[in-house]
Structure formats: structure tokens, C-alpha cells
């Protein structure tokens, strides 16, 4: 009984260490987490492959691109941008619905 539990613990610990680069990439929400996992799975058994995966996993993560909203100046939209009367965000002058607050705009 004790040998089976000991073997299980060893397999879990070794497996956790083997996939450590993949765990690090996933926890950091790395933009290449899938590629890091694939490389870790295929070449992680070599010391060089494992080290490459770990270094890659801790490199800088690209920020997710989100639409920037600025309250200080309107974006360059055609026709001229106006502020939404409901939320104050900038929107195209001919818009009938605000993209920020999703409210209908009365003209």
C-alpha cells in the first residue's frame, strides 16, 4: 500500500516540475502559452528544451490590446466626434447609439 502512494506522489511531483514552464505561462496569461505548452510537451524532456520553455514563459507578456477611450480629447472620427449625452464618452457625430454605454441618442 505504501509503495503505491509513494509512487503516485513521485509521479505528481515530477509531472509538476516537468510542466512548470507551462504552468508559469498559464498563470501569467502569456500570449504564447499554447506554444509554450506544445514545446514543453515535446522537448521538455531535454534539459535545454525545458530551460528554453521556462525562459520563454517568464518573458514579458504583450498587453492585451483594448480600445482606448480618452476623456481629454476626441479620437479622429469622421464625421466630427461629439460627446454622448448619457455617459460623456466620445462617439461619431452621426451615431444613433453610444458604443460605450449602449444607450440610444436622441437628436
Image (tube, helix red, strand yellow):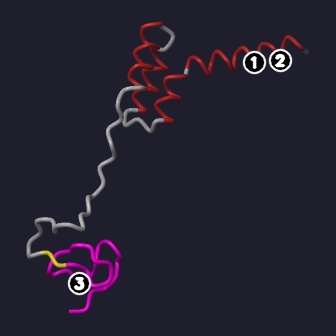
Q: In this view, does 78 lie to the left or right of 47?
A: left
Q: How crowded is mark 3: few (under 14 residues within 10 Å), some or many (20 or more)?
A: some
Q: Residues within 10 Å of mark 1 (few under 14, many from 20)?
A: few
Residue depicted at 72% across the width and 14% down the height: 10
Q: Is label 2 in a helix, a strand or a loop?
A: helix
| Earlier-in-chain disc, 1 versus 3 | 1
- CB under 8 Å between callouts 2 and 3? no
Which of the two discs, 2 and 3, sits closer to the camera?
A: 3
Q: In this view, does 24 lie to the left or right of 8?
A: left
Residue depicted at 35% across the width and 31% down the height: 60
Mark 1–mark 3 Cα distance, whole angstroms, equals 62 Å
Residue most toward the top?
47
Residue receiving disc 1: 9
Q: What stretch is highlighted in magenta?
A: 83-107
User: Where the C terminus falls, by quadrant?
Assistant: bottom left
| Earlier-in-chain disc, 2 versus 3 | 2
Q: How crowded is mark 2: few (under 14 residues within 10 Å), some or many (20 or more)?
A: few
Residue receiving disc 2: 5
Residue receiving disc 3: 96
Q: In which quarter of the image is residue 6?
A: top right
Mark 1–mark 2 Cα distance, whole angstroms, equals 6 Å
Q: In this view, does 66 lie to the left or right of 39?
A: left
Name the main secondary structure of what is drawn in magenta: loop
Amino acid at each position: 500500500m505504501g509503495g503505491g502512494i509513494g509512487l503516485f506522489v513521485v509521479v505528481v511531483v515530477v509531472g509538476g516540475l516537468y510542466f512548470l514552464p507551462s504552468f508559469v505561462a498559464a498563470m501569467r496569461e502569456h500570449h504564447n502559452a499554447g506554444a509554450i505548452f506544445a514545446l514543453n510537451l515535446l522537448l521538455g524532456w531535454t534539459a535545454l528544451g525545458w530551460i528554453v520553455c521556462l525562459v520563454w514563459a517568464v518573458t514579458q507578456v504583450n498587453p492585451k490590446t483594448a480600445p482606448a477611450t480618452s476623456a481629454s480629447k476626441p479620437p479622429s472620427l469622421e464625421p466630427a466626434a461629439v460627446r454622448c449625452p448619457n455617459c460623456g464618452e466620445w462617439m461619431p457625430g452621426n451615431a444613433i447609439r453610444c458604443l460605450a454605454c449602449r444607450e440610444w441618442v436622441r437628436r
